[in-house]
Image (tube, grey):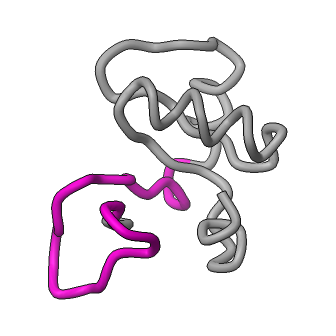
Amino acid sequence: AQALEARGIRYARSDYWTAYYVDFISQERIIVGATSQPRILAYERALAWHASDVVRIETTPCDASPPIVPGYYVCR
């Protein structure tokens, strides 16, 4: 969550458990929706409203960028 906040990232999508953890640990300062199934309708609305700002948090590289923390990559 700190690595995302340091980069100014407020909206993202990721797997269910990463989304759950980041939402919780950031006290919802970062809104992460699950890629597999909607978790919380308010989060889905926020992500739709800020669609141009939404990134993906992945466990595999999506380009040549280094991981933001070991094992996690931000994809645009």
Is residue 54 located in the magenta-colored stretch of the structure?
A: yes
Q: Farthest residue to the front: give it.
A: 70
Direction from residue 8 to residue 70 in the image, left or right: left
Q: Is residue 68 above or below residue 59?
A: below
Identify which residue is drawn at 68% across, 36% down: 23
Identify which residue is drawn at 57% across, 27% down: 20
Q: Quadrant of residue 45?
A: top right
Residue 59 location in percent, x, y?
Answer: 25, 53
Q: Is residue 21 above or below residue 71?
A: above
Identify which residue is drawn at 34% across, 75% down: 67
Is residue 53 located in the magenta-colored stretch of the structure?
A: yes
Q: Which quadrant would the C terminus be assigned to in this image?
A: bottom left
Front-lying residue, 42 or 64 = 64
Q: Which quadrant would the N terminus be assigned to in this image?
A: bottom right
Front-lying residue, 44 or 36 = 36
Residue 19 location in percent, x, y?
Answer: 51, 34
Residue 54 location in percent, x, y?
Answer: 49, 54
Residue range (magenta)? 51-72
Identify which residue is drawn at 67% across, 57% down: 10
Q: Is residue 3 above or below residue 21?
A: below
Q: How many numbered circles are shown?
A: 0
SS assignment for the magenta stretch, majority: loop
Residue 39 location in percent, x, y?
Answer: 53, 13
Q: Quadrant of residue 72?
A: bottom left
